[in-house]
Amino acid sequence: MAGHSKWANIQHRKGKQDAIRSKMFSKLAKEITVAAKMGDPDPDKNPRLRLAVKAAKAQSMPKDVIDRAIKKSQMGDAADYSEIRYEGYGAGGIAIIVEALTDNLNRTASNVRSYFSKAGGNMGQTGSVSHGFDRLGEISYPLSAGSADDVMMAAIEAGADDVETDDDGHWIYCKIEELSAVSEALEAAIGESTESKLVWRPQVRTEVDLDTAIKLMKLIDVLEEDDDVQTVTHNFDVPDEVAAQL
């Protein structure tokens, strides 16, 4: 199976952390509001909202901000957002999936298409890229949760399908419909996870050279800076020697 990407760790070390954090909070709050509006405002009765709140807590979002986002969903003037997925290719033919929540589909589509075009990439049809990814539940734990063997055993007993361990932590994968059950079983066995979420996991990762990595980073940065974009997923990885130059 494809290894966990080093990209998140590289991105974490980049500058402008305050701006990145503010943007992240805004997007997390939007997902909380949408999840609460579509279902029950009680996270215990709404799996999607429960995941959204957990993701927000994992990023240290204050409780009052989370509560405000939930309350906003119950107000009559809360915006109606549509969920949309875009697929395309960046430099080096790297596959990229963009998920968005938007109140203006035309604006978002135009922006995303422009980002790809300016970065030397191109948009594809729905399904043109996602067939190379698996839609899975991902549960992450810090290395302090236990040894790779111990976490592997706990994950198997909880019903997970795969586990990866690297220098950044443990990554446990399961079927999307089993995410809640596996997460609860793991929590009982080895403690609370860092995060539980739905992800697109590439079936194969492609290592890129420095020039390609820089172009892809610029594209991902501009995509993630867009207020409508919630997640950006790709299938490239950065070799250690290239990561050292970034």
Image (spheres, grey):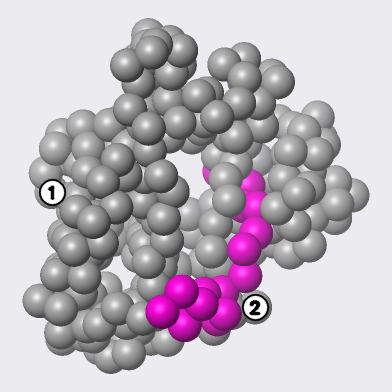
Residue 94 lies, with reference to residue 196, above or below; the image says below
Q: Quadrant of residue 49?
A: top right
Expressed as whole percent of the image width and height from the top left, the position of residue 52 reads 51, 32
The C terminus lies in which quarter of the figure? bottom left
Q: Is residue 137 magenta?
A: yes
Q: Is residue 121 left or right of residue 179?
A: left
| Residue under label 1 | 15
Expressed as whole percent of the image width and height from the top left, the position of residue 218 reads 15, 68
Q: Quadrant of residue 61?
A: top left
| Residue range highlighted in magenta | 125-143
Mark 2 and mark 1: Cα distance apart in space:
31 Å
Q: Callout 2, which amino acid?
A: Met
- Mark positioned earlier in the residue sequence (2 or 1): 2
Residue 58 lies, with reference to residue 173, above or below; the image says above
Q: Secondary structure at mark 1?
A: loop
Marking on residue 158: none
The N terminus lies in which quarter of the figure? bottom right
| Residue under label 2 | 1
Q: Secondary structure at mark 2?
A: loop
Task: Determine the residue positioned at 60% across, 26% down.
Answer: 39
